[in-house]
Structure formats: structure tokens, C-alpha cells
Image (cartoon, rainbow, N blue to C red):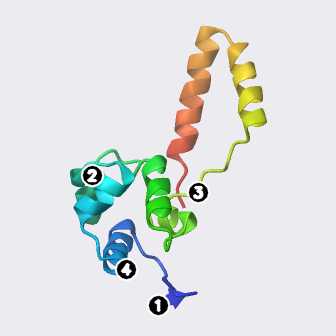
Amino acid sequence: MEYQGQPIGEDLAQLIKRLKETYGVSESEIARAIGAAPATVNAWVHRKRGTGRGPNPDKLRAIAAAFPKFSEAEVFAAAGRKVPGDLRPEARDRIMRLIDELTPEQQKLAEATLQAWTGQNST
């Protein structure tokens, strides 16, 4: 089944297969285009992600950038993740100033909390 020309419920392996057909590229060429190891792309194709958290968001963004017929939202959805929000420079600076005011122990706790939140970034 499709919605607006895109398969519904498509996973990353299926998206990569479609990407390969659309662009006429190999897994190695995809890996080269996004700065990943060919083994990484192969693991996605065989649904062996390794870390349990899924692909790195930077690699997912790189897929959308290198292969623009596939939107960032589409790539992230196929990976079972939500697209992270864009953080404006002034917001980033404000957050970093707050972190700079924390004790080392509080900074470790803040980091652990942020890591837990990013691990929950799935659809």
C-alpha cells in the first residue's frame, strides 16, 4: 500500500532497496556518498543495526542529502525514528550557557538524561 507515492510501513532495508533501484547505485556507492562503511549499509539492508538505537541521525540526514528523491522525514521514518528538530544557534548558545553553570556531577546527569531522551526518539 502507498501514500502519496511512498510505501506505508517501509523499513530502512526496503527504503535502501528502493533507493538503489531509483538511483542505480550499489550499497558501496551509498556508503561512499554518506561517509559510512559499506558494512554499515549492508547491516541496514540485512536489518542488523548493531547498537539497538538504530542508525546515527547524521547518516540518515546524509542519505536524504545525497539522494534528494528521498526526504529526511521519509528516511527517518523508515529507520523508525523521528526527525530531530533544528536547533538555532542562539538556542544552542543558551543551552550551553546553562550547562556551563552546572557542577561536574550535574553535567554528567544532564548528559545521561539527554542520552536517554535521544534513545527514545523512535516512532
Identify the element where label 2 is drawn: helix
Earlier along the polypeptide chain: callout 1 or callout 3? 1
The tag on residue 40 is 2
Q: Residue at x 58, y 87 (%)?
A: 4
Residue 94 in sight: yes
Question: Is mark 1 in CB contact (under 8 Å) with mark 2?
Answer: no
Q: Which residue is mark 3?
A: 83
In the displayed structure image, the side of residue 111 where residue 103 appears, left or right: right
Residue 66 screen position, x and y as percent: 44, 61
Amino acid at circle 2: Thr
Residue 1: mark in rendering: 1
The answer to which of 101 and 120 lies nearer the viewer is 101
Q: Which residue is mark 4?
A: 22
73 over 101 or under it: above or below? below
Q: Residue furthest top?
A: 103
Residue 56 located left or right of residue 50 = right
Looking at the image, do the residues carrying marks 3 and 4 touch, with CB atoms under 8 Å apart? no
Per the model, the C-alpha gap separating discs 3 and 2 is: 20 Å
Figure quadrant of the C terminus: bottom right
Between discs 1 and 2, the one toward the N terminus:
1
Identify the amino acid type marked 3: Val
Q: CA distance from mark 3 to mark 4?
A: 23 Å
State which mark lies toward you, 1 or 2: 2
How many residues crowd mark 3 within 10 Å: few (<14), some (14–19), many (20+)? some
Circle 1 or circle 4, nearest the eye: 4
Q: Nearer the viewer, residue 92 or 24?
A: 24
Secondary structure at badge 3 equals loop
Real-space Cα separation, disc 1 to disc 2, in angstroms: 28 Å
Q: Are marks 1 and 4 in contact (CB under 8 Å)?
A: no
Give the residue drawn at x 33%, y 44%: 51
